[in-house]
């Protein structure tokens, strides 16, 4: 590994288990990275979830002025401005978009014959005001059940293909372990990488992206054509090892 000039982290299944706060040992490493490099968090999570589950795990001394937040799959961007987060840009959906996507999602689920008999844990269709997600087991599903539902991503790949055919004017990606995401056309993590590179006056090749969904169809894989450096991780434990190497290289 060579030291990049900036680094971007995915959140769910990269810095933390999906929909969970990161553990202290990872947050402390993340804080160390903030002292060394301009850093971005680029997640499907909403700003409210980042403020609820991620930021409170950092100490009051964390150098948040070095952190940029890209939320809702990079449909929204925020920089630190004193004690608050200043909006840099924001994309969203119209009511007509929302209704069309919802109808297409449930038609695609039925058309692919996806098994819907598993227990549901809360809302399945969620508008994150920047992207829309369908979560097969619901937002509150236990981690073990999420991981066991589609371990080879075949269910999500089939659903993604069917949904993309129905919604050519949008982009569709695999999200978390049980979900697919619909985003405005061209507004995704690749867009976020290019925006971040422009903000920092860096070529994308000088930036490192670390995420768990860099496989085909994953919502991290779209960053690869930008030329950004990438490291794939499987879970937060592996991410800790990657961060340790990054800190050692850049210190």
Image (cartoon, rainbow, N blue to C red):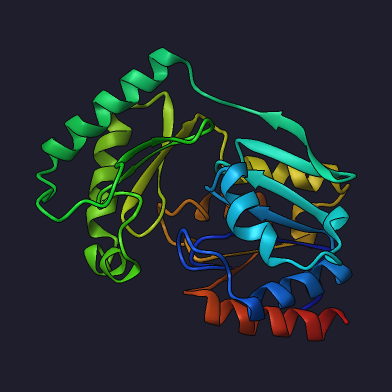
Instruction: Pick the residue in front: 23 or 206.
Output: 23
Identify the residue at image location x=50%, y=29%. Answer: 184
Q: Residue 126 in the image: state x and y as whole percent.
A: 39, 37
Left or right for 220, reference 137: right
Instruction: Pick the residue in front: 81 or 156.
Output: 81
Tell me which corner region of the image, top left, top right, bottom left or bottom right, holds residue 74. top right
Q: Residue 147 in the image: state x and y as whole percent.
A: 31, 68
Q: In which quarter of the image is the C terminus?
A: bottom right
Q: In which quarter of the image is the N terminus?
A: bottom right
Identify the residue at image location x=27%, y=68%. Answer: 151
Q: Residue 209 in the image: state x and y as whole percent.
A: 65, 62
Tell me which corner region of the image, top left, top right, bottom left or bottom right, holds residue 112. top left
Identify the residue at image location x=30%, y=58%. Answer: 141
Left or right for 53, reference 62: left
Please tell me whether residue 238 is drawn above or below residue 66 in the rendered image: below
Left or right for 3, reference 139: right
Q: How many labels does the image show?
A: 0
């Amino acid at each position: 590994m060579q030291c990049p000039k900036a680094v971007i982290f995915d959140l769910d299944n990269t810095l933390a288990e999906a929909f969970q706060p990161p553990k202290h040992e990872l947050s402390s490493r993340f804080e160390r990275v903030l002292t060394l490099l301009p850093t971005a968090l680029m997640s499907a999570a909403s700003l409210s979830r980042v403020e609820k589950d991620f930021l409170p795990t950092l100490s009051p001394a964390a150098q948040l002025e070095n952190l940029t937040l890209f939320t809702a799959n990079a449909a929204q961007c925020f920089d630190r401005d004193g004690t608050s987060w200043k909006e840099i840009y924001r994309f969203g959906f119209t009511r007509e978009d929302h209704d069309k996507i919802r109808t297409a999602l449930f038609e695609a689920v039925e058309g692919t014959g996806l098994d819907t008999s598993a227990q549901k844990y809360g809302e399945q269709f969620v508008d994150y005001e920047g992207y829309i997600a369908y979560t097969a087991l619901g937002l509150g599903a236990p981690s073990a059940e999420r991981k066991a539902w589609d371990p080879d991503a075949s269910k999500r790949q089939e659903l993604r293909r069917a949904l993309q055919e129905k919604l050519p004017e949008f982009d569709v990606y695999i999200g978390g372990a049980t979900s697919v995401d619909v985003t405005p056309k061209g507004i995704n993590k690749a867009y976020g990488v290019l925006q971040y590179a422009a903000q920092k006056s860096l070529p994308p090749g000088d930036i490192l992206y670390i995420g768990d969904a860099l496989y085909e169809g994953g919502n991290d894989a779209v960053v690869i054509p930008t030329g950004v450096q990438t490291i794939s991780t499987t879970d937060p434990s592996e991410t800790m090892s990657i961060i340790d190497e990054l800190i050692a290289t850049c210190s």
